[in-house]
Amino acid sequence: MCESLRLAGKIVSASIDRVADRWYASIVVDTIASFLPPAENQGAVGVDFGVTALATLSTGEIVVGPKALRTLLARVKRLARSLSRKVKGSRNYAKAKNKLARLHARIADIRRDGLHKLTTSITCRFHIIGIEDLNVKGMLGNRRLARSIADMGFGELRRQLEYKAEWRGGQVVVVDRWYPSSKTCSCCGHRLDTLDLQVRQWRCPHCGALHDRDVNAATNLRNMAVSSTVAACGGEGAGLAGEAQGETGPSEAGIQQQS
Ligand SMILES: [Zn+2]
Protein backbone atom coordinates (compact mmCIF):
# COMPACT_ATOMS: atom_id res chain seq x y z
CA MET A 1 0.00 0.00 0.00
CA CYS A 2 1.14 3.49 -0.74
CA GLU A 3 -0.64 6.45 0.77
CA SER A 4 0.35 9.92 1.87
CA LEU A 5 -0.08 10.73 5.55
CA ARG A 6 -3.34 12.46 6.35
CA LEU A 7 -1.91 14.32 9.32
CA ALA A 8 0.96 16.75 9.39
CA GLY A 9 3.58 16.17 12.03
CA LYS A 10 6.38 13.95 13.12
CA ILE A 11 5.95 10.20 12.74
CA VAL A 12 6.59 8.58 16.09
CA SER A 13 5.91 4.92 15.51
CA ALA A 14 4.00 2.42 13.45
CA SER A 15 2.56 -0.95 14.26
CA ILE A 16 1.11 -3.73 12.18
CA ASP A 17 -1.86 -5.83 13.26
CA ARG A 18 -3.52 -8.77 11.72
CA VAL A 19 -7.22 -9.27 12.41
CA ALA A 20 -9.14 -12.07 10.73
CA ASP A 21 -6.59 -12.33 7.93
CA ARG A 22 -6.52 -8.63 7.23
CA TRP A 23 -3.57 -6.42 7.83
CA TYR A 24 -3.72 -3.05 9.54
CA ALA A 25 -1.05 -0.41 9.93
CA SER A 26 -1.41 2.12 12.74
CA ILE A 27 0.82 5.13 12.52
CA VAL A 28 1.33 7.45 15.48
CA VAL A 29 1.90 11.06 14.50
CA ASP A 30 2.91 13.81 16.86
CA THR A 31 0.84 16.81 15.82
CA ILE A 32 0.33 20.24 17.24
CA ALA A 33 -3.20 20.29 18.61
CA SER A 34 -5.45 21.42 15.83
CA PHE A 35 -8.74 22.87 16.86
CA LEU A 36 -11.87 21.96 15.04
CA PRO A 37 -14.55 24.56 14.45
CA PRO A 38 -17.04 24.76 17.32
CA ALA A 39 -20.30 22.85 17.13
CA GLU A 40 -22.61 24.28 14.46
CA ASN A 41 -25.64 24.76 16.60
CA GLN A 42 -24.57 25.97 20.01
CA GLY A 43 -27.63 24.45 21.61
CA ALA A 44 -28.17 21.47 23.84
CA VAL A 45 -29.37 18.01 22.99
CA GLY A 46 -30.42 14.96 24.95
CA VAL A 47 -29.66 11.53 23.58
CA ASP A 48 -31.51 8.37 24.53
CA PHE A 49 -29.79 5.16 23.48
CA GLY A 50 -32.14 2.31 22.88
CA VAL A 51 -33.02 -1.04 21.46
CA THR A 52 -35.11 -0.29 18.43
CA ALA A 53 -33.05 2.65 17.31
CA LEU A 54 -29.39 3.29 17.93
CA ALA A 55 -30.30 6.66 19.41
CA THR A 56 -33.18 9.09 19.73
CA LEU A 57 -32.40 12.79 20.00
CA SER A 58 -34.47 15.32 21.91
CA THR A 59 -35.03 17.04 18.55
CA GLY A 60 -37.16 14.06 17.59
CA GLU A 61 -34.55 12.63 15.23
CA ILE A 62 -34.10 8.89 15.24
CA VAL A 63 -30.76 7.36 14.32
CA VAL A 64 -31.36 3.82 13.16
CA GLY A 65 -27.76 2.80 12.72
CA PRO A 66 -26.19 0.67 10.00
CA LYS A 67 -28.74 -1.18 7.90
CA ALA A 68 -26.41 -3.72 6.33
CA LEU A 69 -26.22 -5.61 9.60
CA ARG A 70 -29.35 -7.67 9.26
CA THR A 71 -28.27 -9.48 6.10
CA LEU A 72 -24.78 -9.98 7.46
CA LEU A 73 -26.10 -11.46 10.68
CA ALA A 74 -28.17 -13.90 8.65
CA ARG A 75 -25.00 -14.84 6.80
CA VAL A 76 -23.25 -15.50 10.12
CA LYS A 77 -25.89 -18.08 10.97
CA ARG A 78 -25.44 -19.77 7.62
CA LEU A 79 -21.67 -19.85 7.83
CA ALA A 80 -21.73 -21.12 11.40
CA ARG A 81 -23.98 -23.95 10.34
CA SER A 82 -21.77 -24.81 7.41
CA LEU A 83 -18.73 -24.78 9.69
CA SER A 84 -20.39 -27.20 12.09
CA ARG A 85 -20.83 -29.67 9.25
CA LYS A 86 -17.14 -29.70 8.32
CA VAL A 87 -14.69 -32.22 9.71
CA LYS A 88 -12.54 -30.64 12.41
CA GLY A 89 -8.93 -30.27 11.38
CA SER A 90 -9.69 -30.54 7.66
CA ARG A 91 -8.76 -27.97 5.03
CA ASN A 92 -12.42 -27.17 4.48
CA TYR A 93 -12.91 -26.62 8.18
CA ALA A 94 -10.04 -24.13 8.26
CA LYS A 95 -11.39 -22.33 5.20
CA ALA A 96 -14.90 -22.06 6.64
CA LYS A 97 -13.54 -20.91 9.98
CA ASN A 98 -11.56 -18.17 8.33
CA LYS A 99 -14.56 -17.03 6.34
CA LEU A 100 -16.63 -16.76 9.51
CA ALA A 101 -13.91 -14.84 11.33
CA ARG A 102 -13.68 -12.36 8.44
CA LEU A 103 -17.42 -11.84 8.50
CA HIS A 104 -17.37 -11.21 12.26
CA ALA A 105 -14.60 -8.68 11.79
CA ARG A 106 -16.56 -6.96 9.05
CA ILE A 107 -19.65 -6.72 11.26
CA ALA A 108 -17.58 -5.26 14.08
CA ASP A 109 -16.18 -2.71 11.60
CA ILE A 110 -19.65 -1.69 10.45
CA ARG A 111 -20.82 -1.33 14.04
CA ARG A 112 -17.79 0.74 14.97
CA ASP A 113 -18.35 2.91 11.92
CA GLY A 114 -22.00 3.45 12.90
CA LEU A 115 -21.00 4.48 16.40
CA HIS A 116 -18.36 6.89 15.11
CA LYS A 117 -20.81 8.46 12.68
CA LEU A 118 -23.34 8.89 15.48
CA THR A 119 -20.91 10.51 17.90
CA THR A 120 -19.41 12.73 15.20
CA SER A 121 -22.80 13.95 14.05
CA ILE A 122 -23.92 14.75 17.61
CA THR A 123 -20.74 16.56 18.62
CA CYS A 124 -20.57 18.51 15.34
CA ARG A 125 -23.98 19.93 15.93
CA PHE A 126 -24.52 20.42 19.64
CA HIS A 127 -22.58 22.11 22.37
CA ILE A 128 -24.14 20.53 25.42
CA ILE A 129 -24.94 16.85 25.24
CA GLY A 130 -26.98 15.09 27.90
CA ILE A 131 -26.77 11.30 28.10
CA GLU A 132 -27.78 8.71 30.63
CA ASP A 133 -25.21 6.70 32.53
CA LEU A 134 -25.66 3.20 31.21
CA ASN A 135 -22.50 1.74 32.58
CA VAL A 136 -24.20 -1.12 34.28
CA LYS A 137 -23.49 -4.76 33.72
CA GLY A 138 -27.16 -5.61 33.89
CA MET A 139 -27.86 -3.28 31.00
CA LEU A 140 -26.55 -5.75 28.48
CA GLY A 141 -28.58 -8.52 30.01
CA ASN A 142 -31.89 -6.77 29.71
CA ARG A 143 -31.27 -5.80 26.10
CA ARG A 144 -32.04 -2.16 26.53
CA LEU A 145 -29.26 -1.20 24.16
CA ALA A 146 -28.88 -1.66 20.46
CA ARG A 147 -26.36 -4.38 19.68
CA SER A 148 -23.86 -1.94 18.24
CA ILE A 149 -23.62 -0.16 21.56
CA ALA A 150 -23.82 -3.35 23.56
CA ASP A 151 -20.91 -4.75 21.53
CA MET A 152 -18.66 -1.73 21.79
CA GLY A 153 -19.81 -0.97 25.30
CA PHE A 154 -21.28 2.17 26.72
CA GLY A 155 -17.83 3.21 27.91
CA GLU A 156 -16.63 3.46 24.32
CA LEU A 157 -19.67 5.48 23.29
CA ARG A 158 -19.14 7.90 26.14
CA ARG A 159 -15.41 8.11 25.46
CA GLN A 160 -16.04 9.05 21.82
CA LEU A 161 -18.64 11.66 22.73
CA GLU A 162 -16.36 13.20 25.33
CA TYR A 163 -13.21 13.58 23.28
CA LYS A 164 -15.08 14.70 20.19
CA ALA A 165 -17.06 17.27 22.19
CA GLU A 166 -13.84 18.54 23.71
CA TRP A 167 -12.34 19.07 20.24
CA ARG A 168 -15.18 21.46 19.51
CA GLY A 169 -15.43 23.11 22.89
CA GLY A 170 -18.55 21.20 23.80
CA GLN A 171 -19.47 19.34 26.92
CA VAL A 172 -21.02 16.00 27.79
CA VAL A 173 -23.23 15.76 30.87
CA VAL A 174 -23.81 12.26 32.17
CA VAL A 175 -27.05 11.98 34.08
CA ASP A 176 -27.28 9.50 36.94
CA ARG A 177 -28.76 6.18 35.93
CA TRP A 178 -31.36 6.40 38.68
CA TYR A 179 -32.89 9.52 37.18
CA PRO A 180 -36.25 8.37 35.75
CA SER A 181 -35.82 9.91 32.29
CA SER A 182 -38.55 7.78 30.71
CA LYS A 183 -41.17 8.09 33.44
CA THR A 184 -40.98 11.85 33.91
CA CYS A 185 -43.14 14.19 31.83
CA SER A 186 -40.81 16.59 30.03
CA CYS A 187 -43.56 19.24 29.92
CA CYS A 188 -44.71 19.48 33.53
CA GLY A 189 -42.35 17.24 35.48
CA HIS A 190 -45.05 14.80 36.58
CA ARG A 191 -43.57 11.41 37.36
CA LEU A 192 -45.33 8.15 36.59
CA ASP A 193 -45.04 5.30 39.06
CA THR A 194 -44.43 2.72 36.39
CA LEU A 195 -43.97 2.61 32.65
CA ASP A 196 -43.68 -0.75 30.94
CA LEU A 197 -40.89 -1.22 28.43
CA GLN A 198 -43.40 -2.07 25.71
CA VAL A 199 -45.20 1.26 26.02
CA ARG A 200 -43.86 3.42 23.19
CA GLN A 201 -46.23 6.33 23.69
CA TRP A 202 -48.01 7.73 26.70
CA ARG A 203 -50.15 10.68 27.76
CA CYS A 204 -49.29 12.64 30.88
CA PRO A 205 -52.21 12.38 33.34
CA HIS A 206 -51.27 15.76 34.81
CA CYS A 207 -50.83 18.08 31.81
CA GLY A 208 -52.21 15.91 29.02
CA ALA A 209 -49.10 16.04 26.83
CA LEU A 210 -48.67 13.08 24.48
CA HIS A 211 -45.15 11.68 24.58
CA ASP A 212 -43.11 9.41 22.41
CA ARG A 213 -41.25 7.36 25.00
CA ASP A 214 -37.74 7.90 23.63
CA VAL A 215 -38.11 11.54 22.59
CA ASN A 216 -39.51 12.35 26.04
CA ALA A 217 -36.57 10.60 27.72
CA ALA A 218 -34.13 12.46 25.48
CA THR A 219 -35.84 15.77 26.24
CA ASN A 220 -35.51 15.14 29.97
CA LEU A 221 -31.81 14.37 29.52
CA ARG A 222 -31.36 17.62 27.59
CA ASN A 223 -33.13 19.60 30.33
CA MET A 224 -31.01 17.97 33.03
CA ALA A 225 -27.85 18.74 31.07
CA VAL A 226 -28.84 22.37 30.54
CA SER A 227 -29.84 22.98 34.15
CA SER A 228 -26.65 21.40 35.44
CA THR A 229 -24.38 23.47 33.23
CA VAL A 230 -26.28 26.65 34.07
CA ALA A 231 -26.08 25.88 37.78
CA ALA A 232 -22.38 25.13 37.48
CA CYS A 233 -21.67 28.41 35.70
CA GLY A 234 -23.99 30.37 37.97
CA GLY A 235 -25.01 32.27 34.88
CA GLU A 236 -28.28 34.00 34.25
CA GLY A 237 -31.26 31.74 34.29
CA ALA A 238 -29.86 29.84 37.22
CA GLY A 239 -32.68 31.44 39.20
CA LEU A 240 -33.21 29.80 42.56
CA ALA A 241 -30.06 27.79 42.28
CA GLY A 242 -28.10 31.05 42.22
CA GLU A 243 -29.38 32.07 45.64
CA ALA A 244 -28.55 28.83 47.31
CA GLN A 245 -24.86 29.29 47.01
CA GLY A 246 -22.72 26.65 48.56
CA GLU A 247 -25.63 24.27 48.71
CA THR A 248 -26.21 21.70 46.12
CA GLY A 249 -28.70 23.00 43.61
CA PRO A 250 -31.72 20.84 42.98
CA SER A 251 -30.61 19.99 39.51
CA GLU A 252 -27.09 19.09 40.49
CA ALA A 253 -28.22 16.13 42.49
CA GLY A 254 -27.70 13.01 40.53
CA ILE A 255 -25.49 14.56 37.92
CA GLN A 256 -21.96 13.59 37.24
CA GLN A 257 -20.32 16.29 35.31
CA GLN A 258 -17.34 15.88 33.10
CA SER A 259 -15.16 18.89 32.69
ZN1 LIG B 1 -47.12 16.49 32.08
Image (tube, rainbow, N blue to C red):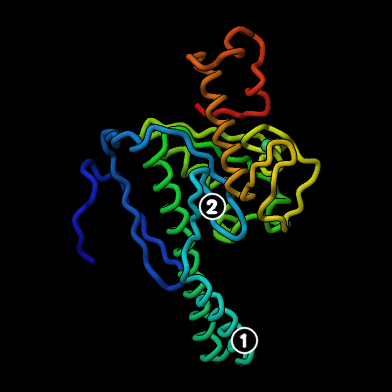
How many other residues sit within 10 Å of disc 1, few (<14), some (14-19) or many (≥20)? few
In the orientation shown, which residue stands out farthest toward the front?
Answer: 208
For residue 17, side relative to residue 72 (left or right): left
Mark 1 and mark 2: Cα distance apart in space: 33 Å
Picture coordinates of residue 203, whole percent (x, y): 69, 46
Q: Is residue 177 visible?
A: no
Q: Are marks 1 and 2 in contact (CB under 8 Å)?
A: no
Which of these two is toward me, 30 or 133? 133
Q: Is residue 112 above or below residue 86?
A: above
Residue drawn at (60%, 7%), measured in percent from left and top? 243
Picture coordinates of residue 147, whole percent (x, y): 59, 61
Specify which label sits upstream in the sequence, 1 or 2. 2
Q: Is residue 114 above or below residue 185?
A: below
User: Residue 55 — which label?
Assistant: 2
Q: Secondary structure at mark 1?
A: helix
For residue 258, side relative to residue 134 (left or right): left
How many other residues sit within 10 Å of disc 2, few (<14), some (14-19) or many (≥20)? many
Which of these two is toward me, 202 or 12? 202
Q: Is residue 246 above or below residue 176?
A: above
Q: Quadrant of ligand 1?
A: top right
Residue on which the image places disc 1 = 81
Q: Is residue 231 visible?
A: yes
Q: For the residue marked with disc 1, what is the amino acid?
A: Arg
For residue 91, side relative to residue 191 (left or right): left
Q: Quadrant of residue 166?
A: top left
Which of these two is toward me, 192 or 79? 192
Ligand 1 under 8 Å from disc 1 Cβ: no
Label count reads 2
Q: Quadrant of residue 180?
A: top right
Residue drawn at (23%, 51%), measured in percent from left and top? 6
Q: For the residue marked with disc 2, what is the amino acid?
A: Ala
For residue 54, side relative to residue 181 (left or right): left
